[in-house]
Image (cartoon, grey):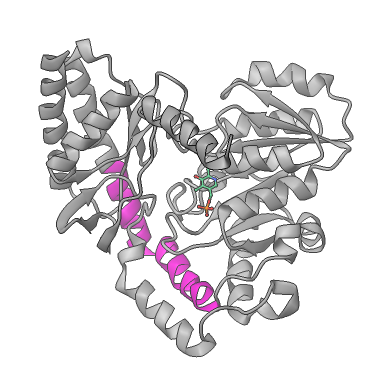
Amino acid sequence: MSLLDHLSAKLAAISAQSLTRKLRRADDGTAPRQTINGRPLLMFCSNDYLGLAAEPAIADAIAEGARRWGGGSGASPLVSGHSAAHEAVTDTLARWYAPHVPEARAIGFCTGYMANLAVVTALGDERTEIFSEQLNHASLIDAARLARAKVTRYPHADLASLRPLLAASTAKVKLIVTDAVFSMDGDLAPLPDLLKLADEFDAWLIVDDAHGFGVLGEKGRGSLEHFGLNSERLILVGTLGKAAGLSGAFVAAHATIVEYLLQAARNFIFSTASPPAIEHALLTSFELIEGPLGAARRANLVARQAQLRDGLLALIDHHPRLGWSLTDSATPIQPLIVGGNAEVMALAAALETAGLRVPGIRPPTVAHGTARLRITLCGTHTEADVDALLTALERAAAAQEQAA
Ligand SMILES: *Cc1c(COP(=O)(O)O)cnc(C)c1O
């Protein structure tokens, strides 16, 4: 069989399960409004949780950074790609996490995917056992596959199952690896209890805060601030392409861990450093996150979350036959679990007709039978925006119930 025939058969199988993914091209705009095919759409799908990507101060900072530093960094950090802007970013992050990790230091990466690969593969050597949460992000799963460590999965948020696994481990180093905010469900990992287990069994806790950074905590420093954690065992991965409104990622941890990543993480050593103009703009983003604008956006997010959840619960009550449900989420990720793949895509299409962009998420990203609308809120959504979504959903629900 030729490769093309082989792939065509696989593509046909994907399509038969209503699982074909399609790129949509935006012609302009950023969260929460984009133009697609000449139509302005109100978005509930971006991870730009504070709406910072659209802030004029960010665009100005990128331009200022580009005038000072030019375009790309030109080389990996250890060759010539490391600038004063890069260092100011990691210095700021080291200061942010000093209350949470003794002797905190930070190191930068181009993406969160890279940061996760770096930290899990560099620390997960032959003497290590990785305890990986069932709902971890794909990048953490791939990282665990690449690591030389033994990998043991534990069920979602189930510490009663994790405890005997830790107790039975004879590995020299134990790494518990978890998302802080689960990206498809929006719920929080029980980090304080995970840290207690780590203390009890001499394990280390890698926390991927992609969806907590900027959003959680009074100053927006994420889940460690939210839970008030402090421990040398905490190894934090944060991403800068979501609430920070730009791109990039970092690991913040004890200085010895960070120094080891700098010496040993292959994707830090062998990959071109991020553009210094982006790093320069990240400094502006950090000021916005911890300043009054960030605080106001976080307060608005909390209000919009409550409005949305109340509305969705009422909708589920009106249409019990559809069998829809919510997750236990107190974050801007508020999924509506619909069940079937075709149903969720029909729902997403109906919303788009009404001028709303909300993505349908299907297996394998989520478990079979739990296809969902992944509704995400942005700090710049208004009460009227959320009302528009609820009104359109009510109409679509009535139509699906009639068709069923
Ligand atoms: C988005 C995401 C990542 C990857 O970050 P990028 O910067 O987009 O590569 C990692 N972990 C989680 C939980 C994410 O949601």
Residue at 67 percent across and 16 percent down: it is 161
Residue at 75 percent across and 47 percent down: it is 121
Q: Is residue 396 above or below residue 320?
A: below
Q: Is residue 21 magenta?
A: no
Asked if residue 99 can be seen in this view, the reply is no
Q: Quadrant of residue 6 in the image?
A: top right
Judged left or right of residue 241, residue 115 is: right
Residue furthest toward the bottom?
68
Judged left or right of residue 276, residue 326 is: left
Judged left or right of residue 37, residue 67 is: right
Q: Quadrant of the N terminus?
A: top right
Q: Position of residue 382 (x, y in %)?
A: 18, 50
Q: Could you tell me how many numbered marks the image carries? A: 0
Q: Quadrant of residue 348 in the image?
A: top left
Depth check, front residue: 85 or 374:
374
Depth check, front residue: 211 or 143:
143
Q: Is residue 294 magenta?
A: yes
Residue span colored magenta? 276-303
Residue at 57 percent across and 24 percent down: it is 157
Q: Is residue 324 above or below residue 396?
A: above
Residue furthest toward the top?
321
Q: Position of residue 147 (x, y in %)?
A: 76, 42
Q: Is residue 19 above or below residue 4?
A: above
Q: Is residue 202 above or below residue 125?
A: above
Q: Position of residue 3 (x, y in %)?
A: 57, 41
Q: Position of residue 285 (x, y in %)?
A: 44, 67
Depth check, front residue: 374 or 18:
18
Q: Main secondary structure of the magenta part?
A: helix
